[in-house]
Image: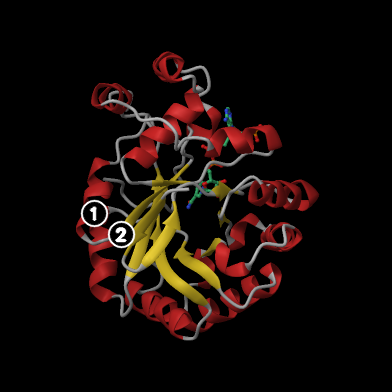
């Protein structure tokens, strides 16, 4: 496993996404993932699966300090007293005393950013999380957050795959020592059957999804692909034994197009 170092955090470069996984399937996939070598699991309050994720991690009987667990605070809990309470509830559901990384799930202009960041930093100081970070923050919001946060931020988790150009956000992350964590890293499954990725994969004996994930980690990003299928767990982590050439990397970057974004909501910020 490769790690990405960011402002004191050491993040396993591939993690398991768990959005939409619930109940026994979720626990089983998490447990199997750990048995197959995953050391990083991504959940969120709003996924309503923290209890199942915790169950899977405990069932795998791995030492807690070998795991990197991320959860995200939902935007309705951004007022300082709500944030602390909601994180304690997350920890109860996960059956943990701390998470490794706690993120603000989306920017929320309804609550002053300084107040929310103060509460996020306080959660770290109280030992509820080892590291703190952002999700769905734009360049301007990253700059604002870094300037206002009393503790170092370690990442911005954003949608990132070959169909979406994230050069600007990645630049802002790099400048501030933040890791870029790619969500929907295989474009919610859309990379399957992509001609360019499959073609490049043939030369390396790899699938389109593996080429896509390799393209992300080779840039220094973290990727958190989700699957509900145990056989795909091994496929998605088996990306550390080959290298893409500069030409191949650039061919993949050229797949980006203006309509490549998959996740957008009315409450989303104005994207870069
Ligand atoms: N911060 C945020 O706002 C935010 C937003 C979205 C997602 N996320 C996080 O990022 C994680 C990943 O993103 P995502 O779930 O949107 O999408 P994704 O990981 O890009 O894609 C998941 C989809 O791809 C399929 N798949 C998985 N492995 C495959 C493979 N090797 N070949 C072909 N298809 C494959 C899965 O189907 P099967 O289950 O059938 O394998 C599933 O339908 C989420 O689970 C969540 O943890 C965060």
Q: Residues within 10 Å of mark 1 (few under 14, many from 20)?
A: some
Decide which of 79, 59 is in the foreground and name it.
59
Q: Name the secondary structure under disc 1.
A: helix
Q: Position of residue 36 (x, y in %)?
A: 64, 45
Q: Which residue is mark 2?
A: 178
Mark 2–mark 1 Cα distance, whole angstroms, equals 6 Å
Mark 2, other Cα within 10 Å: few <14 / some 14–19 / many ≥20: many
In the picture of the structure, the residue carrying the numbered disc 1 is 174
Residue 217 falls in image quadrant: top left
Please name the residue shown 74% across and 61% down the image: 55
Spot occupied by residue 251 in the image (x, y as percentages of width and height)? 29, 21
The image quarter in which residue 110 lies: bottom left
Q: Is mark 2 within 8 Å of ligand 1?
A: no
**Residue 107 visible in the snapshot:** no
Residue 50 as seen in the image, left or right of residue 178: right
Residue depicted at 23% across the width and 61% down the height: 176
Extreme residue toward the right, this view: 24
Q: Which dot marks residue 86?
A: none
Q: From the top left corner, tell me how far across and down residue 21 is, in percent.
A: 68, 47
* The furthest residue to the front: 241
Considering only vertical position in the picture, is 165 above or below 193?
A: below
Is residue 178 visible in the rendered image? The answer is: yes
State yes or no: Cβ of the residue under disc 1 lies below 8 Å from any atom of ligand 1: no
**Residue 63 x/y as whole percent:** 64, 67
Q: Secondary structure at mark 2?
A: loop
* Residue for point 46% across, 38% down: 185
Question: Observer-nearest residue: 84 or 230?
Answer: 230
Asked whether the beta carbons under mark 2 and mark 1 sit within 8 Å of each other, the answer is yes
Q: Quadrant of residue 118?
A: bottom left
Answer above or below: position of 200 versus 138.
above
Q: Quadrant of ligand 1?
A: top right
């Amino acid at each position: 496993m490769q790690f990405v170092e960011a402002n004191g955090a050491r993040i396993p470069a591939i993690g398991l996404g768990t959005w939409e996984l619930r109940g026994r399937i979720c626990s089983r996939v998490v447990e199997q993932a750990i048995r197959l070598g995953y050391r990083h699991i991504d959940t969120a309050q709003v996924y309503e699966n923290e209890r199942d994720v915790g169950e899977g991690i405990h069932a795998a009987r791995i030492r807690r300090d070998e795991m990197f667990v991320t959860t995200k605070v939902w935007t309705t809990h951004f007022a300082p007293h709500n944030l602390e309470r909601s994180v304690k509830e997350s920890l109860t559901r996960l059956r943990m005393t701390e998470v490794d990384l706690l993120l603000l799930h989306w920017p929320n202009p309804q609550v002053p950013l300084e107040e929310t960041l103060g509460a996020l930093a306080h959660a770290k100081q109280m030992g509820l999380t080892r590291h703190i970070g952002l999700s769905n923050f734009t360049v301007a919001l990253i700059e604002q957050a870094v300037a206002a946060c009393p503790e170092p931020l370690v990442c911005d988790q954003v949608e990132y795959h070959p169909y979406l150009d994230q050069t600007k956000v990645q630049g802002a992350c790099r400048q501030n020592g933040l890791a870029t964590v790619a969500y929907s890293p295989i474009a919610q499954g859309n990379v399957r059957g992509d001609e360019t990725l499959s073609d490049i994969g043939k030369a390396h004996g790899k699938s389109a999804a593996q080429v896509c994930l390799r393209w992300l980690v080779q840039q220094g990003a973290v990727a958190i692909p989700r699957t509900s299928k145990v056989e795909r767990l091994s496929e998605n982590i088996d990306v550390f034994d080959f290298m893409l050439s500069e030409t191949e990397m650039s061919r993949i970057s050229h797949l980006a197009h203006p309509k490549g974004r998959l996740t957008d909501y009315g409450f989303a910020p104005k994207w870069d």
